[in-house]
């Protein structure tokens, strides 16, 4: 059976899904608060570190995620359902406005206050490349695993990391223009998109594991 080659719209869907999962616009206030003590040059360095780290984490998930699942004996459809449930949970948090509380617990918050380097932890992991984004990337890579698709996904991840870098670079301006209300509205819209994507993951996994259940 020939592997399915996605067209351009498939990569756009993957990119939009990543954008909705990570929601970099919603993380902008967090980025501002974490880097408020830094001079502009140091803030730009933190931004670069976070964006590169996100790209590395997602690319690792893209190419090694399937091997990790096989190592633990987990089927991709079980992982797809688990990832879908996680994505729906994150989406509900985004819609209800409680995303920050779910992504960062109290211990991580207290550690952040005394840590100098915040680009990798907690900005890149778990705030940006969290379990939802990692699971979504693994699901896409195992479903469409030809080299052409992996190349397309890699380019989408690189473009996504670049967009995150641009958004955080313009973070002070965006906070002034959008305000907290504008950022909240965008976060909720991303949450709706994300919930639809998570439900699609769940339905696809159930169709394979329980073929007689859905028609």
Image: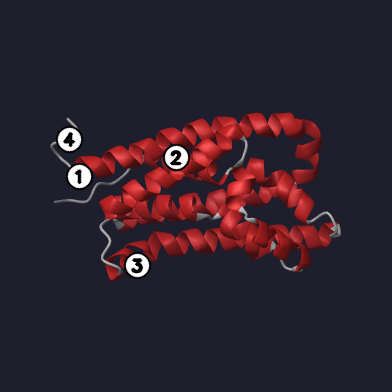
Colouring: secondary structure
Image location of residue 185, percent across then percent down = 64, 29
Q: Which of marks 3 and 2 is nearer the N terminus?
A: 3
Q: Nearer the viewer, residue 91 or 183?
A: 91
Q: Nearer the viewer, mark 4 or mark 1?
A: 4
Image location of residue 28, percent across then percent down = 70, 45
Distance (Cα) linking label 3 and label 2: 23 Å
* Residue 50 visible in image: no
- Give the residue number, with chain letter if any, for mark 3: 68
- Give the residue number, with chain letter if any, for mark 4: 213
Q: Nearer the viewer, mark 1 or mark 2?
A: 2
Image location of residue 92, percent across then percent down = 51, 36
Q: Which of marks 1 and 2 is nearer the N terminus?
A: 2
Above or below, 211 against 34 in this view is above
Q: Earlier in the sequence, mark 3 or mark 1?
A: 3
Dot 3: element: helix
The residue carrying pointer 2 sits among few (fewer than 14), some (14 to 19) or many (20 or more) residues within 10 Å by Cα, namely many
Q: Which of marks 3 and 2 is in front?
A: 2
Image location of residue 177, percent across then percent down = 78, 32
Distance (Cα) linking label 1 and label 2: 20 Å
Q: Is residue 148 left or right of residue 177?
A: left
* Residue 171 visible in image: yes
Disc sitting over residue 208 in the figure: 1
- Residue at (32, 41) in percent of width and height: 202
Dot 2: element: helix
Dot 4: element: loop
Residues under numbered marks 4 and 1 in contact, where contact means CB atoms less than 8 Å apart: no
- Residue at (29, 70) in percent of width and height: 71
Q: Quadrant of the C terminus?
A: top left
The residue carrying pointer 3 sits among few (fewer than 14), some (14 to 19) or many (20 or more) residues within 10 Å by Cα, namely few
Q: Earlier in the sequence, mark 4 or mark 3?
A: 3
- Give the residue number, with chain letter if any, for mark 2: 88
């Amino acid at each position: 059976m020939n592997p399915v080659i996605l067209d351009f719209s498939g990569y756009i869907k993957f990119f939009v899904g990543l954008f909705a999962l990570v929601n970099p616009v919603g993380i902008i206030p967090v980025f501002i608060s974490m880097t408020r003590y830094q001079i502009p040059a140091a803030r730009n360095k933190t931004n670069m570190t976070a964006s590169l780290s996100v790209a590395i984490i997602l690319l690792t998930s893209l190419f090694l995620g399937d091997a990790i699942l096989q190592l633990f004996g987990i089927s991709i459809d079980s992982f797809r359902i688990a990832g879908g449930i996680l994505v729906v949970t994150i989406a509900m948090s985004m819609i209800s406005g409680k995303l920050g509380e779910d992504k960062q617990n109290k211990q991580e918050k207290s550690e952040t206050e005394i840590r100098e380097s915040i680009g990798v932890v907690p900005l890149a992991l778990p705030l940006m490349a969290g379990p939802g984004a990692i699971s979504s990337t693994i699901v896409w890579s195992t479903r469409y695993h030809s080299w052409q698709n992996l190349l397309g996904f890699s380019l989408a991840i690189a473009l996504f990391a670049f967009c995150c870098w641009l958004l955080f670079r313009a973070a002070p301006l965006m906070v002034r223009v959008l305000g907290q209300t504008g950022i909240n509205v965008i976060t909720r819209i991303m949450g709706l998109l994300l919930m639809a994507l998570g439900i699609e993951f769940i339905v696809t996994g159930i169709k394979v594991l329980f073929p007689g259940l859905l028609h």
